[in-house]
Amino acid sequence: MRLRFVLLWLSFISTAVLATEADMTERQIPVPIAVSDELKHAITQFGIPTVQQALDSTPTDKETWLALIHSVNTEQKKKVKKMRKQYNVNVEMMNINGVTVRKIVPATLSDKFKSKVYLDVHGGAYVFFAGLPSIEEGILIAHRLGIEVISVDYQMPPHAPSPAALNDVFSVYTALLETHGAHNMFVGGTSAGGGLVLGLMQRLVNENIATPVAIYAGTPWADLTKTGDSLYINEGVDRILITYDGVLKAAANLYANKIALNHSSVSPLYGNFEGFPPTFLLSGTRDMFLSDTVRVNRKLREVGVPTQLEVFEGISHAEYLVAYETPESVAAYAELGAFFSKW
Amino acid sequence: MRLRFVLLWLSFISTAVLATEADMTERQIPVPIAVSDELKHAITQFGIPTVQQALDSTPTDKETWLALIHSVNTEQKKKVKKMRKQYNVNVEMMNINGVTVRKIVPATLSDKFKSKVYLDVHGGAYVFFAGLPSIEEGILIAHRLGIEVISVDYQMPPHAPSPAALNDVFSVYTALLETHGAHNMFVGGTSAGGGLVLGLMQRLVNENIATPVAIYAGTPWADLTKTGDSLYINEGVDRILITYDGVLKAAANLYANKIALNHSSVSPLYGNFEGFPPTFLLSGTRDMFLSDTVRVNRKLREVGVPTQLEVFEGISHAEYLVAYETPESVAAYAELGAFFSKW
């Protein structure tokens, strides 16, 4: 078969034997060139851990999990307090249907979202960001879209594995349905939050409950298995996730508990996407969940659901949220707001 | 700054010094798991050349360029003849405004595209696929969309560098404008063809000439410089392009001739995107031009142009065209047809 080499423009090596796996030699990927100065600064100031460094930080038992969770949440709390002050949002803790939520009201409500509510489902690999840390993206969305946000402080492992989180989100959704009506509701989240949003929609469709106007799934963790192409390609490049084989894999097992990782109740990618409302999807060229994001996009389009897929240059997993003061982050949420106001 | 490590869930390594470049250790990227069996088969049957094998096949002078071009075109001609027969399209060679074109009429015209014409601008790194090989994608689009196609056999280096190709495409476009009217026209192409389509739109807007109903830019080579993040990340993973530093860089210099690689007349990414018609963009997770594709998408959205971005799991550069008998390829052109019929 000479043709195969020619298609590669490589007719000079037609006698070579080629591998079917891509051989990656040792090399360095430079800081992305075509991104904002702010993002370049965030990346260089931060640095990128190696895969080995990430593997070495993986918890191995309940005690080390709790220590890591405590440490992560303590730092995240500082960031959230800073953001709350910076954007002057009002945060009120409430209880809805037995679930702790926080109502976030921005200084200025946008005219187009005055009667609307956004149900925020936070990320954090299904283990991090309980309590005040949960409202990181809720604050951003309240402020940037000018919309009232209800952020769910759902239960998580080690003490509450699946299906506790989804049950909590479902309880809050159905309560808001009573008070606001589906035509006034949006739902969204990033990473594990995106996965829960997709899982919630599948449950709503399954139980014949009204779906919201539109949803947002930012780089959703839609597949807990190590299947997506970008989990391999962007290993060591994605500065947020770094590798699947450390914290991610351990967190997936902790969350799924006795459920198989590829069961649709924990990996909504393997479920049904019919009946979904219009969906906004967000990822980046360095995102290890790029494959999850684009596979969800294809699943939705295959059943005729309108979507908007945005992939940002040089952006790692959820970096539009981690580095929220970059023009990339501002642009991402501007697109989200425009998408929500279309429906 | 402890925060930065926590954001990475890596609080255990907070004393480590991190690099700003991503360190890639030597490793193998497996054949993508979550793709069709047909695509897996195409990849494994094919194999993936190493970067070194690709570099070794780079032409170094006019003689080796002509030899490579001849070899590539000879094989591509066989594929095109097979496709022409397989899909039973009628191909007629014509001359429009002094430019060689081929009119491709499918066995069945779709009702919605009966009065329409699709101007096809072929790919091939601005050097390959002159003559009959130019109609590869034109045949697919004629057959799958059920639309009449005019495919431009534009001039190329070594004998005709930029702006010959764009001038030829422009000449054919303006002629079709007279006979068909802008409201009946679509324009599209893959790779270098996608770059030329974007360049054509910039020229039309600049000269106040009517733009078509909608356009298609498949994994467009919109930036001839080595700037896009995915040129680095997907080096050695993208089985079609393999590396920028071989044939691509040499072809870019051959085509640009005396023009700087980042000048908008050869790299439309650096030009103006205002006034563009709705644009359909296509790429994959292994595509070295993923960054070009998503950067064009962002440029268009920033100025309010409606776009649809589709990124396919496990797809290398233009693999939807190279491996045209995969479900991924069928789905890609189905989306294109649906997009065109919306406007």
Image: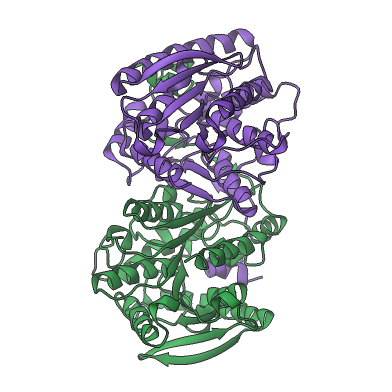
Chain colours: A green, B purple
Image quarter in which the N terminus of chain A is found: top left
* Front residue of this view, candidates B127 and B274: B274
Question: Residue A179's quadrant in the figure?
Answer: bottom left
Please say if B111 is above or below A99.
above
Q: Does residue B287 appear in the picture of this structure? A: yes
Q: Point out residue A268 in the picture as x, y percentages from the top left corner.
A: 32, 63
Residue sitting at x 46%, y 59%: A55
* Front residue of this view, candidates B176 and A110: B176
Residue sitting at x 66%, y 23%: B167
Q: Point out residue A28 in the picture as x, y percentages from the top left corner.
A: 59, 43
Q: Point out residue A334 in the picture as x, y percentages from the top left corner.
A: 60, 64
Q: Point out residue A172 in the picture as x, y percentages from the top left corner.
A: 38, 83
* Front residue of this view, candidates B286 and A110: A110
Residue sitting at x 71%, y 21%: B257
Please say if B297 is above or below B203.
below
Please tell me how many numbered marks the rendered image carries: 0
